[in-house]
Amino acid sequence: MRTRLLPLLIVLLAAVLLALGIPLAGSLAAAQQQRVVVDRMDDAARFAALAQFVTDGPGGSRRTTTDERRAGLRSELESYHDVYGIRAGVFYRNGTEAMANAPGDWFVPRAGEVRRAFDEALLSRRSHDPPQAWPWQHSRLVVASPVIRDGDVVAVVVTDSPTEQLRSRILRGWLVIGAGEIAAMLLAVGAALRLTGWVLKPVRVLDATTHDIATGRLKSRVAVAGGPPELRRLARSFNEMADNVEAVLEQQRAFVADASHQLRNPLAALLLRIELLALELPEGNAEIASVRTEGKRLAQVLDDLLDLALAEHAEADLGLTDIGALAGERVAAWAPAARAKGVSLTGDCPPTTAWADPIALSSALDAVIDNAVKFTPEGGTVEVAVCADGDTTTVVVTDTGPGLTDEELARVGDRFWRSGRHQNVKGSGLGLSITRALLAAGGGSVDFAHHEPRGLRVTVSVPRHPPAIEAAQGAR
């Protein structure tokens, strides 16, 4: 969920920052240019004030001025050009003759931005603001101001400014804005990470607790101290649900255990009466033998039900265990039964440690090995191999028996399930269910697969590291 929520927040934050940054960058550029335009307007107004005292008309006609004033105006324009690199001139109305200009070879062209500004100034008004200069454009700023005497426009002051410094200032301002946007984005991403972590932490805890309950740790609960109010309510509701589920399962377990226990005494009394009745009948009576067999089978089912009820709710006593030594002991214990049936039982059990409940694992291996020996025909083989694979240690039991079909593999381990081909084999159908429950209590598992060319492959897995719940309890 975090990988979906975090990009969404980052995109929204980036959109907000861009929506603020782009207008700010445009305003900065406009403000920088406006400052330059105002300066040029002030300069043009000053030159226009000086030009009012120069009343020569085109062609050299004189009115009331002196050559010194013209020379002073020309000197001002040349100094202005030398210091700032700005072309400036005072041009008569025809635009082809200059009262004074700097550089001396610069005149109003017949077309272009300078000509448009000059024509606007002839209408006795200041030229319009020049187009916005952007850092990637090589443009110039043109400002024209009329020289008015006695209500008439007698000349026009024109300034043509380069924009390198203006564009540099705009670019530096943009870099500052960009750095601010990046810093704000980094802060926003950090805040989004903290926010999503705060929001999703209860979800992660809820997911881990759900997994613990699904694997048999029914005592796991979710802490309701952190996170948004909605997730705290969800945590409380989850804990209530887990309490109810645990209570129902406990009632079921208690019912199975009590029923199994209560039925054993009447069944024992019934078997005793059958034995007494058998004494009154001829030896070898088929009906009595059949009743005795079914009674013993029912007693075995009751014992297995009681074991299953205890296994499903028993707390695992986990410890660092030598899985190789334990598996070797079980192979040695089952070797006589395998030899009696004519089955070869071998083990490859190198020393390998893992976290497991030794008693529960021994019971699970007994059930698996017993199942393999039971269904392997005379002359077949059963192999037990122990190996470490990443974070788990596995005990693999393979046999050369008839194996199971794909449909049967999907159901193996279910309570009371037995293959239709093996109904005549002794058993209650609860052994592998008990095995799965014993392993799940300690964080282990059991898997079933085909063994080529024939037979069944059973893999018992236990963790090489302490389960998270055990590590957390140890830390506390």
Image (tube, rainbow, N blue to C red):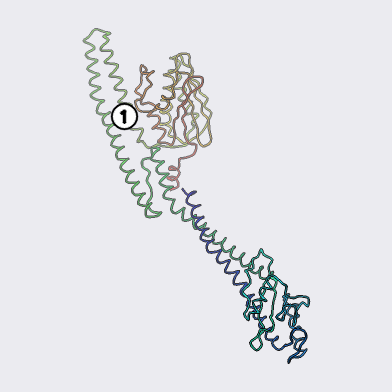
Where residue 465 appears, as percent x and y from the top left, is 49, 39
Q: Residue at x 30, y 40 (%)?
A: 247
> Viewed as shown, does residue 133 lie left or right of 280?
right
Does 359 sit above or below residue 98? above
Q: Residue at x 41, y 22 (%)?
A: 371
Does 259 sit above or below residue 14? above
Does 89 sit above or below residue 255? below
Image mark count: 1
Where residue 1 appears, as percent x and y from the top left, is 46, 48
Residue kind at label 1, given as amino acid type: Leu
Nearer-the-camera pick, 6 or 113: 113
Where residue 83 appears, as percent x and y from the top left, is 74, 78
Dot 1: few (<14), some (14–19), or many (≥20) neighbours within 10 Å? some
Where residue 311 appears, as percent x and y from the top left, is 36, 32
**Is label 1 in a helix, a strand or a loop?**
helix
Does 311 sit above or below residue 114? above
Q: In the rendered image, which residue does mark 1 sit on?
A: 306
- Where residue 95 sits, quadrant-wise, is bottom right
